[in-house]
Image (spheres, rainbow, N blue to C red):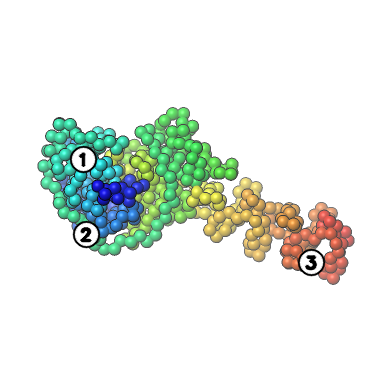
Amino acid sequence: MRLRRDWRRIRAGMVWIVLGAMMFFVLLVPQHAYGATQCPATREECQSFIDILVDSYVEEVGADNEAVYVVGPEPVFDLASGDPVFSGTQCWSVYCCDELAAFIFSVETDEGITFTLSTGTAETLAENFSFSPGETAQIAMRGDDLLYVAGESGDAYLVYDNGVCNPCDEPLQSLADTLNQTPRASRRVSSAKSAPVTVASSKTLGVPYVSQGNNPICWAASACQAGRYLTGNTGWTAVSLCNAVKGTLAGGTVADTRDAYTRFTYSGSATRIATTHVSGAPTESVIGHWINAGLPIHARTSSNNGSGHAVIIDGYKTYSSGAMALRLVNPGIANPGVVFATKSSGYYHFFYNTSEGNTFKWDRGSVVFTGWQRPFGGSRWSYFSSSGAKTTGWLKSGNYWYWFDSSGYMTTGWQKVSGKWYWMDSGGAAVTGWKKIGSYWYAFDSSCAMRTGWFKDGSTWYYLRTATNTPASGPEGAMLAGGTWTIGGKAYRFDSSGACLNP
């Protein structure tokens, strides 16, 4: 069908978008009996949430906002028991151009509601059978590996993690028929926005996706994502990086993660990626520092089943409503693994319906990039604190001084600071002593400032121009050499090396 082919081209490169509920959702949303087909909050609150989510979705895939609408919700069941997967878990069907394009999941936990928009499962289903425009889908899960979906037609399918979709066998079809007896919603919730929801500010770094595959190596895959972004080094894979650090494919600690980053060196440099670990939930201002400065964040999260997971934060959006959404690159889902999440009850939450089927929250701290880095995956050096703040002005690193401009980038060449001239070599270090720059010799004192006027080096006197073309043609600070020059009304002779012969 042409519309489906067109939609697939539109959504190329996009798989997942997730938004958690804003804080006021958590405070206002009551507990509901599972299986209710009404919004978990008031219609106004639900509409506001959908507006934000649809806006992010439309922007990400480049679709027409008026072509996207949502129907539902429907409850989500555990296929084996017939009980809810989580209390208050519901599914909404999202259509674009009257074709099934995505599912929205709302999941209630002790810490509030997390909303998820997933295109992966919808894509798999759309390739196997058709939904009538405006239909809702009944979804159930079985174990850790399978996702079950039944349309209003009564057909039932098993959708595997790898994207394979097969018709259900007779027993499962029988259970599907039972589940399909649940009254269904049949109304559109959103085809037009109730109120404008605009993006106040945003930043996306574009960290490349790396899959962890079926291995418990999310920490290595995430390190591979950020390492490739910063250095451009694509030689490491998630598997090879994990084996280099651990010697086996296994979960990793903070120390393992930091070790993994040291395996990446910046091109044309021996500098390795430096990191530190920050505990606790970061504030929005700290997150903004990192992202705006051009550095992703290696976030360590925990699942409601006790397991851990690592993702890369590579962007954010702030909305006119005051909500801040984070853009995650998740190695545990299909390429490109893009997720959006907002804060609820003090933590950022996200949910995705892969084999885990769990909610995650960012509560295990972060591995962040400090010291010398080249932000935005570029070629200019910056120096970062653990808060993500770029150094500006002077910095002493090792035995050398460096000057960073107002944008936080290391400078080279001539720099005038507080009325004094300095020369930064190709590595950014401010020089001291004698330095030939172009055709002229200059002298720099112990503070790295360029000397002018008379200068005695050992037992020899030299003269360095105090201003351009004084006393003869040449730049300020350039050493006089070869000839006789009048300085302060007296004639002085200088040899070819600049030594004054009659001081």
User: Is residue 333 visible in this depiction of the protein?
Assistant: yes
Amino acid bearing label 1: Val
Q: Which comes before the other along the chain, label 1 or label 2?
A: 2
Mark 1 and mark 3: span between their CA atoms?
Answer: 86 Å
Query: Which one is in front in this view, the residue at disc 3 or the one at disc 2?
Result: 3
Q: Secondary structure at mark 1?
A: strand
The residue beneath circle 3 is: 472
Which residue is denoted by mark 1 in the rendering? 149
User: Percent from the top left, x then y, of residue 235?
Assistant: 50, 37
Task: State how far apart marks 3 and 2 are (Cα).
Answer: 79 Å
Describe the element under mark 3 as helix, strand or loop: loop
Q: Position of residue 1 (x, y in %)?
A: 24, 47
Q: Can you tell which mark lies on residue 44?
A: 2
- Where the C terminus falls, by quadrant? bottom right
Q: Which of marks 3 and 1 precedes in the sequence?
A: 1
Q: In the image, which is nearer the foreground, mark 1 or mark 2?
A: 1
Q: Amino acid at mark 3?
A: Ala
Please tell me in which quadrant of the rendered image residue 121 appears.
top left
| In-image side of 193 versus 257 (left or right) | left
Tell me the crowding category of disc 2: few under 14, some 14 to 19, or many 20 or more residues within 10 angstroms, Cα based: few
Question: Viewer-proximal residue, 391 or 501?
Answer: 501
Kindly identify the amino acid type of the residue bearing the numbered disc 2. Answer: Glu
